[in-house]
């Protein structure tokens, strides 16, 4: 409750669902449909948690998290981040974690589990 979450998802229905689930859990949600939109919203939103899809047109989620991490501590570059993705293999998980995500969650995810995971990763924020 009270967390600010930046959600990045190119599929409109999935974005709406994630937004509703997190808002019902008490989060304030800022949404973006691509990496460019997420980076533009990042400074204004100052999210407590970033939830991003991996497979997006243009810059993918891996490129997005690398750019976020490059922002540095003072601009929020260490924000806890969750990769919520259809890329569900062990190699995909390892790649997401190596890129800078804290968690790799395969789609589909149970709504209550998503809320729990977002709240849990927020506790890791430095």
Image (spheres, rainbow, N blue to C red):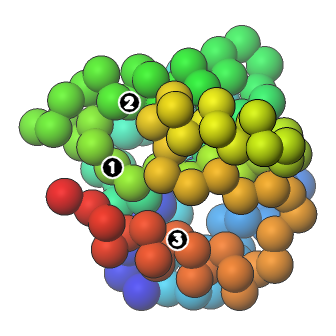
What numbered label is drawn on residue 118? Answer: 3
Task: Tell me if I can see residue 92 in this picture.
Answer: yes
Residue at image position (67%, 74%) is 114
Looking at the rendered structure, the secondary structure element under dot 1 is loop
Q: Is residue 120 or residue 14 the one in the foreground?
A: 120
The image quarter containing residue 116 is bottom right
Task: Kindly report the distance in space between the C-alpha atoms of the residues bearing marks 1 and 3.
Answer: 12 Å
**Compared with residue 62, is residue 109 higher up or lower down, i.e. above or below?**
below
What numbered label is drawn on residue 44? Answer: none
Do the residues under discs 3 and 2 have CB atoms within 8 angstroms? no
**Compared with residue 13, is residue 1 higher up or lower down, i.e. above or below?**
below
For the C terminus, the quadrant is bottom left
Looking at the rendered structure, the secondary structure element under dot 2 is helix
Residue at image position (44%, 23%) is 66
Q: Position of residue 100 (x, y in %)?
A: 45, 36
Do the residues under discs 1 and 2 have CB atoms within 8 angstroms? yes
Task: Tell me if I can see residue 38 in this picture.
Answer: no
List the residue tagged with mark 2.
Answer: 68
What numbered label is drawn on residue 79? Answer: 1
């Amino acid at each position: 409750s009270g967390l600010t979450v930046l959600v990045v998802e190119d599929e409109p229905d999935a974005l709406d669902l994630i937004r509703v689930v997190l808002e019902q859990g008490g989060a304030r949600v800022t949404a973006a449909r691509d990496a460019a939109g997420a980076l533009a919203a990042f400074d204004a939103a100052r999210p407590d948690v970033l939830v991003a899809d991996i497979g997006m047109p243009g810059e993918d989620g891996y490129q997005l998290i690398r750019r976020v991490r490059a922002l540095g501590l003072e601009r929020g570059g260490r924000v806890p981040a969750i990769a919520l993705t259809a890329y569900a293999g062990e190699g995909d998980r390892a790649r997401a974690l190596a890129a800078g995500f804290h968690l790799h969650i395969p789609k589909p995810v149970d709504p209550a589990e998503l809320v729990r995971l977002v709240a849990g990763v927020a506790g890791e924020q430095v």
